[in-house]
Image: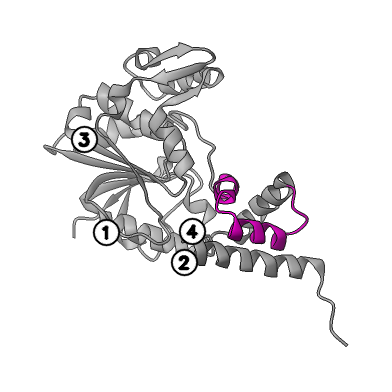
Amino acid sequence: MTEIQPAEKVEDIEIRLLLEALYITYHYDFRNYSIASIKRRLRQAREQMGFANFSALQERVMHEPDMLPRLLRYLTVQVSEMFRDPSYFRALREKVVPHLRTYPSLKVWVAGCSGGEELYSLVILFREEGLEERTIFYATDINQEALHVAESGIFALDRVRLFTENHRNSGGKSSLSDYYQAAYGRVSFDKTLRRNVVFSDHSLVTDAVFAEMHLISCRNVLIYFNRSLQDRAVGLFKDSLVRKGFLGLGAKESLRFSRYAGAFDEFVREEKIYQKRGA
């Protein structure tokens, strides 16, 4: 007799096949993401998109490319806020910026930029510290829709109160309202904030180093990767940073168990800011 597989085991098989199909067909590689995280997001996608099982979802995505952006909204994390964790940005302002001032030109990479909240936070911080003109910012994400949102610089008006409070607590030297205009329930950030920004599709899973950076900020991205993928990303950051360059991670992230931990010193331990060693 043919053994009947438990429903959860069938689901796991379907998920593996779906992730493999996404990689082979569209070159989006989620196979080494944290399985608990990816399963939770896929279940949400399946339910809200109205599919009875993952096999049905896979069939539609494989045969209808327009379905891919809808699925990617669930698979890529798009939750952020400007100056999120203000103490992190205060540490950048007070402890990292003095080192960055010593360079004649700077490159900053916001990896996994989502809708652009962290990017605009850094550009504003650099403008307030007099470093914007000598800096090129690279904002990357695997989600094209997120990149379009980031490039537009438009956010819901009801989010601005939190943005403003975070900016003030981060040591902001101006009013956040100096950087945007409000109308029709939205705010549009000044186009000049994007004049030194390069928006680009880049995957920490499959893509390589593309420039030499002085600061990389990749916050709350690694927590969604498994250990081997975390190591790949950290290795990419190591190879992308100049000697004595800086890496900022999220509050729940660490290099402690990374195979590349020895390449970095803890620069501001409590804010998860690291400095690449000089050797």
Q: Amino acid at mark 2?
A: Ser
Residue at (35%, 17%) from the top-left corner?
179
Q: Amino acid at mark 3?
A: Thr
Is the residue marked by circle 4 packed among few (<14), some (14-19), or many (20+) residues within 10 Å?
Answer: some
Image coordinates of residue 211 in percent, x first then y, are: 23, 51
Q: Is residue 75 above or below residue 188?
A: below
Tell me which numbered mark, 1 or 3, is placed earlier along the sequence: 3
Marks 1 and 3 sit apart, C-alpha to C-alpha, by: 20 Å
Nearer to us: label 4 or label 1:
4
Tell me which secondary structure the magenta stretch mostly adopts. Answer: helix
Q: Is residue 95 left or right of residue 105?
A: right
Marks 2 and 1 sit apart, C-alpha to C-alpha, by: 17 Å
Image coordinates of residue 143 in percent, x first then y, are: 47, 46
Q: Amino acid at mark 4?
A: Tyr
Q: Residue furthest front?
A: 63
Disc 2 target residue: 228
Secondary structure of the residue carrying numbered label 4: loop
Is the residue marked by circle 3 packed among few (<14), some (14-19), or many (20+) residues within 10 Å?
Answer: many
Disc 3 target residue: 135
Q: Is residue 125 above or below residue 202?
A: above
Tell me which numbered mark, 4 or 2, is placed earlier along the sequence: 4
Is the residue marked by circle 1 packed among few (<14), some (14-19), or many (20+) residues within 10 Å?
Answer: some
* Residue 279, image quadrant: bottom left
Secondary structure of the residue carrying numbered label 3: strand
Disc 4 target residue: 28
Q: Amino acid at mark 1?
A: Asp
Is the residue marked by circle 2 packed among few (<14), some (14-19), or many (20+) residues within 10 Å?
Answer: few
Cβ atoms under marks 2 and 3 closer than 8 Å: no
Disc 1 target residue: 239
